[in-house]
Amino acid sequence: MGKVIISSFEELQALIGKDLGVSDDHVITQEQINKFAEATLDFQWIHTDPERAKKESPFGNTIAHGYLTVSLLPYLWEQIVDVQNLKLQVNYGIEKFKFNQPVLVNSTVRLYAKVVNAVNLRGVIKTNIGVKLEIEGNKKPAYEGEMVFLYHFNN
C-alpha cells in the first residue's frame, strides 16, 4: 500500500477518524541508542551499558530511551503520509501520550497512525494524529498518543 497523499485542508478533514496506515519496520540498535545518548547527554546505564543491563536490569538487556522512540515519529510518519502543497509544517505538540512498554535493544517497531482531528485556524491547519508504536512480538505498544502538527498549505 502506498503513502496517503494529502494536499489540502479538505483532504485532511475527509480523513478524520480514518486509519492512515503503518510505517515500515524499524530495528532499534545499540548504535542508535548510543548516538541518541550522545546527542541528549543521557548516558543512564540502562540504555548504554549492555553488560550491566544484562546483569542488573529487570529487562535483561538495554532499552531505548523513551524519547528516542518519540523522536522517530517524523521519520516513521513520513513513511505513511506524504503531505504536499505545503509552505510550512510545524511540530506543534504531543497530547494524551503514554509510554506503555520499554523497547529492548534490537526490537523491531512500526508506527500506526490515524487522523483524530483537523481544524482550520484562519488558514493554519491544526491536526491531531493518533499514533501507536508497536513492538514486534508484544501485545502492548511502546506508546500511544497524539502528535499535533500545524500545516500551512499553499492556496
Image (cartoon, rainbow, N blue to C red):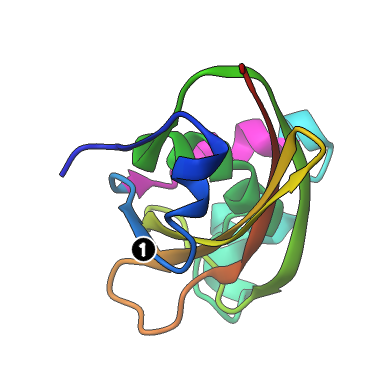
List x then y, in percent, for residue 81.
40, 38
Q: Is residue 1 above or below residue 107?
A: above
Q: Is residue 83 above or below residue 66?
A: above
List x then y, in percent, for residue 88.
69, 20
Q: Is residue 4 magenta?
A: no
List x then y, in percent, for residue 128.
64, 57
Locate the C terminus and report the quarter of the image it occupies.
top right
Residue 45 found in image quarter: bottom right
Tell me how many marks there are.
1
- As helix, strand or loop, the secondary structure at mark 1 comes to strand
Q: Is residue 127 above or below residue 99?
A: above
Residue 86 appears left or right of 6:
right
List x then y, in percent, for residue 78.
44, 34
In terms of depth relative to the viewer, which is nearer, 64 or 111? 111
Residue 49 visible to the viewer = no
Q: Main secondary structure of the magenta part?
A: helix
Per the image, the residue denoted by label 1 is 19
Q: What is the magenta range?
A: 26-37
Dot 1 amino acid type: Asp
Q: Is residue 33 magenta?
A: yes
* Residue name at image x 52 percent, y 69 percent: 142
* Residue name at image x 55 percent, y 76 percent: 101
In terms of depth relative to the viewer, which is nearer, 63 or 143? 143
* Residue name at image x 69 percent, y 43 percent: 149
Locate the N terminus and report the quarter of the image it occupies.
top left
Q: Is residue 147 above or below residue 61?
A: above
Disc 1 crowd, CA 10 A, few/some/many (<14, 14-19, 20+): some
In the orientation shown, which residue stands out farthest toward the left?
1
Residue 137 appears left or right of 63:
left
Residue 14 visible to the viewer = yes
